[in-house]
Structures are given as structure tokens and as C-alpha cells.
Image (cartoon, rainbow, N blue to C red):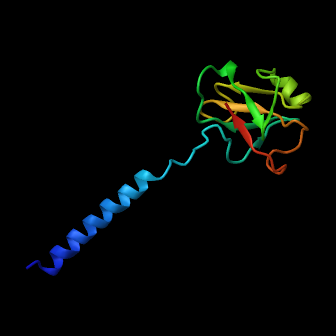
Amino acid sequence: MMSANTRVVIGSTLFALASSAFLYLLPPSPIDKGLLRGNFHSYQGHAYLVPVKFIDGELNAARLYEDDKLLGPANSVEQEIIDKGAGRFALLRDAWNYRGPALMFSTSDNTDPNTNGRKYHLK
């Protein structure tokens, strides 16, 4: 005859195994590494800065999307992003107050990306 403690241990183990099997069968949730999250820091003029954690491939091959719209021109000169905006962007290896790469960009219509309701993806 099994003690109550043994039954609890066996029951807990079986529950853990069944839960793990169930979770294994669920499809993985897609994690969009390219989605830019957090606060976009107003820099100057139409330019905003955001640190970039994930960069796949060459910096000069990056593409920036506003919702589903491709922005650009890519690799724009910093002063053009500040003065003209209109979707221009550039990836910087070291920028402003960040330790590491950052994206300097402008929105398609020069609105504030913190309040315009759009999502920005870097691919």
C-alpha cells in the first residue's frame, strides 16, 4: 500500500509530464524580433532614435517598415533625416546616449511615432 506522500509525488509527476506534453504540441508563438518597442526618443527636427537589439545581416541592407509600408531611403545622411524626414532612416553603430547600435528614423508623414498608432519593423 502506498503512502499519501508517495501518491502526491506520483500524481504531481504525472501532471507535470502531461502538461509538458501538451505545451510541446502547441505551435510556438511567433516572436517578432524586428518589431521596435519602447519609447522613440525625439532627437532633432523629424529624427527619432531607438536602440536596436537584434540586427541580422549587414547594417546597410536593413529595411524599415511602417506597418506594411517600406520606408526610405535607407542609409540616409543624418542631417537629411533631421531636416526632411519623410521616412528616411539610418542604422548607427554607436549613437547619442546608447551603448550599441541605434536606429535614427523619421515617419512617413513626419508625425511622432510615439503617438501616431503605427508599428515599426526593422528587417
Residue at 84%, 31% in the rendered image: 87
Q: Is residue 31 left or right of residue 89?
A: left
Image position of 34 with respect to 93: above or below: below
Residue 10 shown left or right of residue 59 in the figure: left
Q: Quadrant of residue 66?
A: top right
Q: Kindly give the residue lying farthest to the left in the view shown.
A: 1
Left or right of 112? Residue 54 is: left
Q: Quadrant of the N terminus?
A: bottom left
Which residue: 65% across, 21% down? Answer: 59
Residue 11 on image: x %, y %: 25, 71
Residue 71 at what x, y percent from top left?
Answer: 81, 30
Pinpoint residue 8: horizontal percent, then vertical percent: 22, 75
Q: Residue 94: which quarter of the image?
A: top right
Count of numbered labels shown in the rendering: 0
Q: Residue at x 11, y 77 (%)?
A: 2
Nearer to us in this view, 20 or 87: 20
Q: Position of residue 61 (x, y in %)?
A: 68, 20
106 vs 117: above or below: above
Q: Considering the image in quadrants, where does the C terminus appear?
A: top right
What residue is shown at x 62% (from left), y 19% (from top)? 58
